[in-house]
Structures are given as structure tokens and as C-alpha cells.
Image (cartoon, grey):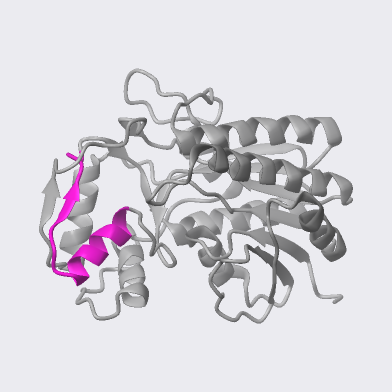
């Protein structure tokens, strides 16, 4: 136990970001991780430094009991709902994304020097005229259901941290994919259609989207965790993204070409989501300066990893790993 530097409670371990985070810290000798899994969550791979407990994450008392018993130095809250298809019912989405976040922040407030890392989203930002990438001081305000729920939680935990002296880091990742992203999201939908040899219907793809490897976003979480233990205090907010301003159609076509994926992409076959923003790109200057973070991995390679694990019969070419 004397060699343990970080005792981490992690939510969302069965999701894309949690899975990639565990790939980075799950076998570290100086880290001990307790994952909080929903009763219906899939079983995790085995990592040396990870144990899991299944708990109803909306049961405030049960969550608090488990977290307090573990006495973490850091709570990393990645769990969320609302970005898969079919969409989570609106009020259930709010209850999960807001109530659980506030409960975990309250847990952190009762544990001395417990650093709370909340994974918010770039979708929380208010849309604006023009095409300037979003900076951390831009206002949060959106009608996008998932974005609104995360924006509400973002505001509440920052207020709670100020009130109760909780060391807080808010990370706002933009779009990402990689290992574990096998549910009904963009690149898993494309890969599934390719494996089934069917065309895939997409929006026109004119919206500008910032896409990253999930491994890069997970690396940002690790850097935030390490920075706090090196004496950084107070509340810190960081965007995590690629900063790329290519239209979504270009991003998808580039990945398909890099993988030599045989698929018919039908752009314009469906309308974009009602509240999907036309421009969503991160300014990552603060994360670069303060955390030493920058995206390093090729997006196409992240999709290749997803294909190899979740669609093993699909023929894909391995692209270069580093961007």
C-alpha cells in the first residue's frame, strides 16, 4: 500500500472513455482503481490494479457508502447517458447526468483532499456566430439534451467546489472514438454497416466536428490527475479536442480511405439531430500550456482498433498510429 499514489474511483468504466483510461492506468503499480458499474453494465477486462463493484448509481446512499469506504484521492466521473441510439428518455437523462454528478461531488467534499475530475462535454457551449473554436471561458448554454444536462452539472459542481473547497478539474472533451465505442455512435454505425455489407445513411456532413482518439482524451485525464497531486489546487477547466475544422463528411471519408474500408456512404440520407450544432471545435491552448497535453494519435487508427476488437471479421487496413 505504501507505493500507492492514487486511489481512484472511476465511473463509466464500461464506456469508451473509461475503457481507454483503464488501458493507461489499470496496470500501474502506483494506482489503485475502484470502478462503479451499473448492475446492467458489461463485464470489464481484467487489469492488475482494478477492482469493481456493481451499484445503482442513482442510489445516493449506496454510492456514498461505497466511495467513502474506499477513501479515494481522486474521483474520475466519466459515466453519462444520452449519446447513444435510441436516445435516453429526456428526464431520465437529466436525472442521471446531473444527480449522479452532484452526488459524487458531495462525496469528494466529505473526503479530505479528494480531487474531483468531472468529464463534461464541448456540447455544453452556447452556439455563436462565426467559426472561432470554443475557449473555456465561453458561456455554457444549449438546448441539446445531452449538452444541457452536462452544462447543468458543470455549473453545479463548480459552484459546489467553490463553496466546499473541493479540488476540481472540469474536462470538456469534444467528439472522440476508439476502443469500447461499439454502441450506436458514428464510427461504430459505419463499421457495423461495412461488416453487414449494407450502405450507411448519414447526414449531409456539412457540420464541422472536432474528432479525437479516445486514448488521447484519456491521456488528458491522467495528466489532470497527476497535475493535481503535484500541488495544483482550485478549479481548472480544460477543453480536449483536435482543433481540426474539417467538415464531418471530410473526416468520415478520410477515415474510410485510410482503413481501405469497403462501404457505400450515403450522405444526406437523414437530417442532423434537431439541436446538433453546425460548428463544434475546441481551442486546446490551455490544455497544451497547463497540462502539456496535445492529441497525438491518428483518428483512423483509433477506428481501426475499434474495428479489430468489435468487428473482427471486417477487413480493414491498419493506418499509421501517430498523427
Q: Quadrant of the C terminus?
A: bottom left
Residue 91, picture quadrant: top right
Left or right: residue 104 versus residue 246 is right
Picture coordinates of residue 114, whole percent (x, y): 81, 51
Q: Is residue 73 visible?
A: no
Residue 153, picture quadrant: top right
- Figure disc tally: 0
Left or right: residue 80 versus residue 50 is left
Whether 194 is among the magenta residues is: yes
Q: Which residue is at a point 12% across and 49% down the rendered structure image?
A: 266
Q: Nearer the viewer, residue 26 or 98?
A: 98
Q: Is residue 276 visible?
A: yes
Q: Quadrant of the N terminus?
A: bottom right
Q: Decide: is 196 above or below 210.
A: below
Whether 305 is among the magenta residues is: no
Picture coordinates of residue 224, whole percent (x, y): 64, 51
Amino acid at each position: 500500500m505504501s507505493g500507492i499514489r492514487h486511489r481512484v474511483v472511476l465511473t463509466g468504466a464500461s464506456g469508451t472513455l473509461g475503457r481507454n483510461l483503464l488501458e493507461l492506468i489499470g496496470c500501474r503499480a502506483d494506482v489503485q482503481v475502484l470502478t462503479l458499474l451499473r448492475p446492467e453494465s458489461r463485464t470489464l477486462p481484467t487489469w492488475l490494479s482494478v477492482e469493481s463493484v456493481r451499484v445503482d448509481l442513482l442510489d445516493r446512499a449506496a454510492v456514498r457508502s461505497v466511495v467513502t469506504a474506499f477513501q479515494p484521492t481522486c474521483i474520475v466521473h466519466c459515466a453519462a447517458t444520452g449519446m447513444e441510439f435510441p436516445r435516453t428518455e429526456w428526464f431520465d437523462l437529466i436525472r442521471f447526468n446531473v444527480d449522479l454528478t452532484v452526488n459524487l461531488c458531495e462525496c469528494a467534499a466529505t473526503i479530505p483532499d479528494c480531487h474531483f475530475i468531472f468529464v463534461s462535454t464541448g456540447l455544453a457551449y452556447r452556439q455563436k456566430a462565426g467559426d472561432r473554436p470554443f475557449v473555456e471561458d465561453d458561456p455554457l448554454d444549449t438546448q441539446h439534451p445531452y449538452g444541457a444536462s452536462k452544462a447543468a452539472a458543470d455549473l453545479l459542481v463548480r459552484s459546489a467546489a467553490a463553496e466546499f473547497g473541493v479540488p476540481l478539474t472540469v474536462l470538456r472533451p469534444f467528439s472522440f472514438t476508439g476502443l469500447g465505442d461499439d454502441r450506436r455512435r458514428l464510427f461504430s454505425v459505419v463499421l457495423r454497416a461495412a461488416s453487414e455489407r449494407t450502405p450507411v445513411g448519414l447526414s449531409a456532413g456539412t457540420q464541422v466536428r472536432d474528432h479525437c482518439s479516445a486514448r488521447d482524451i484519456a491521456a488528458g485525464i491522467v495528466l489532470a490527475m497527476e497535475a493535481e497531486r503535484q500541488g495544483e489546487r482550485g478549479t481548472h477547466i480544460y477543453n480536449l479536442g483536435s482543433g481540426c475544422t474539417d467538415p464531418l463528411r471530410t473526416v468520415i471519408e478520410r477515415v474510410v480511405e485510410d482503413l481501405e474500408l469497403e462501404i457505400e456512404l450515403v450522405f444526406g440520407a437523414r437530417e442532423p439531430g434537431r439541436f446538433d450544432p453546425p460548428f463544434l471545435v475546441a481551442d486546446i491552448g490551455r490544455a497544451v500550456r497547463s497540462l502539456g497535453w496535445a492529441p497525438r494519435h491518428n483518428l483512423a487508427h483509433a477506428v481501426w482498433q475499434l474495428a479489430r476488437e468489435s468487428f473482427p471479421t471486417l477487413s480493414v487496413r491498419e493506418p499509421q498510429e501517430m498523427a
